[in-house]
Image: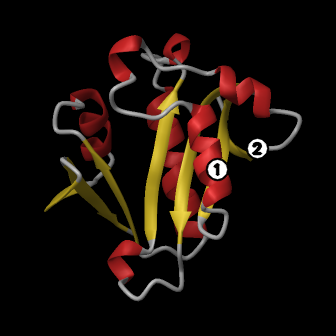
Amino acid sequence: MKTQLVKIDDDNIKEVIKLKVSKDQTQYIASNEDSLKDAKENADVARPFAIYHDGKAVGFTMFAFDEEYEDENDRYWLWRFMIDEKQQGKGIGSTALKAIIDYFKENGANNIRLSTKQSNTNALNLYRKAGFKDTGEEIDGEIVLQLEL
């Protein structure tokens, strides 16, 4: 089983927009369509990718890479990460998160930060299992986690 990050282009954008989380998860993440709009508005730092598993689009992720930002702890963010509801529970989230971490390492990041609601227990378990630690910070009611690379 191979999981990889693929740049979003005209060939896969419609497929990515169709990917959805379950209804109870929509409170935690913007739709992929909204995320892609955010990516256009923040084109200088946003890096959106489709997540493919065994050749099939199964998720979406978007990073913030701002290597010029003065605070080293705020340069690299995992902004969005979702796996389609039909693909959840198969271990794809873990392998996709590993691919995401590898991408950050390969592109010179010294850490990765993310934020989510305290009630998003499934995601928090996944992040903590991968080594993300709570920073004690909160942004807009979400807790911040960081992984040192």
User: The residue under label 2 is which amino acid type?
Assistant: Ile
Q: Say which residue appears at 30% left-offset and 51% top-offset.
A: 115
Image quadrant containing the C terminus: bottom left
What is the secondary structure assignment of the residue under circle 1?
A: strand
Is 70 placed left or right of 37 in the picture? left
Disc 2 from disc 1: Cα separation: 7 Å
Q: Tags 2 and 1 in contact by the CB under 8 Å rule? A: yes
- Mark with earlier residue (2, 1): 2
Write down the quadrant of residue 41 in the picture: bottom right
Q: Say which residue appears at 53% left-offset and 75% top-offset.
A: 66
Residue situated in front as seen by the camera: 124 or 95: 124
**Residue on which the image places disc 1:** 48
Is 139 placed left or right of 71 in the picture? left
Residue sitting at the far right: 11
Q: Which mark is residue 8?
A: 2
145 above or below 84?
A: below
117 above or below 24?
A: below
Is 57 placed left or right of 67 in the picture? right
Q: Is residue 49 visible?
A: yes
Task: Residue 17 in the image: state x and y as whole percent.
Answer: 67, 27
Task: Residue 6 in the image: state x and y as whole percent.
Answer: 73, 44
